[in-house]
Amino acid sequence: MLSDFDFHLPPDLIAQTPAAERSASRLLDGRTGGAVDRIFKDLPALLLPGDLLVFNDTQVVPARLFGEKPSGGQLELLVERVLPNLDGEPPHQVVAHMRVSKKPPVGTLLRMFNQSGTAQAYTATLLGRWPQDDGPLFRLALSSEPLALMQAHGHVPLPPYIEREKHSMNAQDLARYQTVFAKHPGAAAAPTAALHFDDDLLAQLSAIGVLRASVTLHVGAGTFSPVKTDKLSEHRMHSEWYSIPAATLQAIADCQARGGRVVAVGTTTVRTLESWARSGLTEGDTDIFIRPGFGFHVVDVLITNFHLPKSTLLMLVAAFSGFDQMHALYKHAIARRYRFFSYGDAMLLNRAAI
């Protein structure tokens, strides 16, 4: 039941700014069924030569766009994904959330503003709902290449619980709400467990024989959505695009062959690897919903931040570490005043025995 994943979080534990240094965040070590307070830069002492760290190398893009309807009514778009150009379809299509007082009809030409909001810079034509006619998102055709338009005129979105004017970034956010190895643009939110890694820590891990590989999952704004149905089986999971390179598949096979551990950095990496394990597909959409009772096939160890009450990410952690262990760790974290959510602290977890 949904209530099993609720808890009281004091509002002042929601991190509004990142730690002074990426690897200076706290790390709650819950691998052995207990709870040990550590610092994230202790990680090299907690991993073994031959372990494989798997990161999500998605890059957060300026996906928040502002504009107006022909009537002058203001609107905001949050782009979830850029769609491929298909023959017979309008080019430069995106899928987005829309915030507006009254939804415009299909075919409406929207006037979109420049980054400062002072002038029209491009247009967006509303094509309909997505992924179906009654879907929660909107499909739009922009007047030119979407990623270029977002870079020129968009704002990088922050999670709704980080309090900034219009959730806009300051200089510190621009530097820190992105991983040091972000490579493939397309995410509306950062893979936050990976924000704790800096170049020095990565070098230390390499020096002791911990190997690295990457996947790409473009994190959507749906990652922040709480579950609203009492029966978890009725929850409609959001869909995200992922890709796994052949080199990563080989690295996983080599790791397993030598008896090493596959260490997923973040829940998005878990969702990517376990989606591939079930479907055999190295690229595509996934709406996998990992909750207690799920059987893991790839991931042995998980590094993750602390998640929202009633969220699918919290359910994933419960599935991975065990329901009782998840609750014990969160109770400990609140008592010891760990920092929560995107800019917060992290946990290190072993996969629970079945």
Image (cartoon, rainbow, N blue to C red):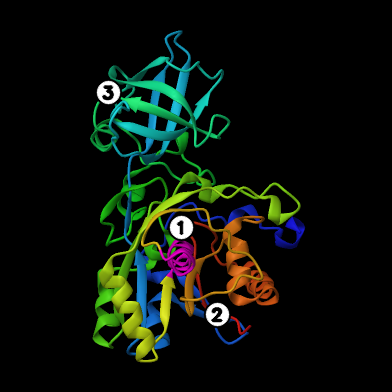
Which disc is residue 143 wearing? 3
Disc 1 target residue: 343
Location of residue 2 in the rendering, given as x and y in whole percent from the top left corner: 73, 56
Q: Nearer the viewer, residue 191 or 105?
A: 105
Q: Is residue 82 magenta?
A: no
**Quarter of image, res 113:** top left
Q: Position of residue 95 (x, y in %)?
A: 42, 35
Position of residue 92 in the picture relative to residue 9 (left or right): left
- Among numbered discs 2 and 3, the one appearing first in the sequence: 3
Q: Nearer the viewer, residue 73 or 353?
A: 353
Span of residues in magenta: 265-280
Q: Is residue 247 above or below residue 69?
A: below
SS for dot 1: loop
Visible residue check, residue 336: no
Q: Quadrant of the N terminus?
A: bottom right
Q: CA distance from mark 2 to mark 3?
A: 47 Å
Q: Which residue is mark 2?
A: 351
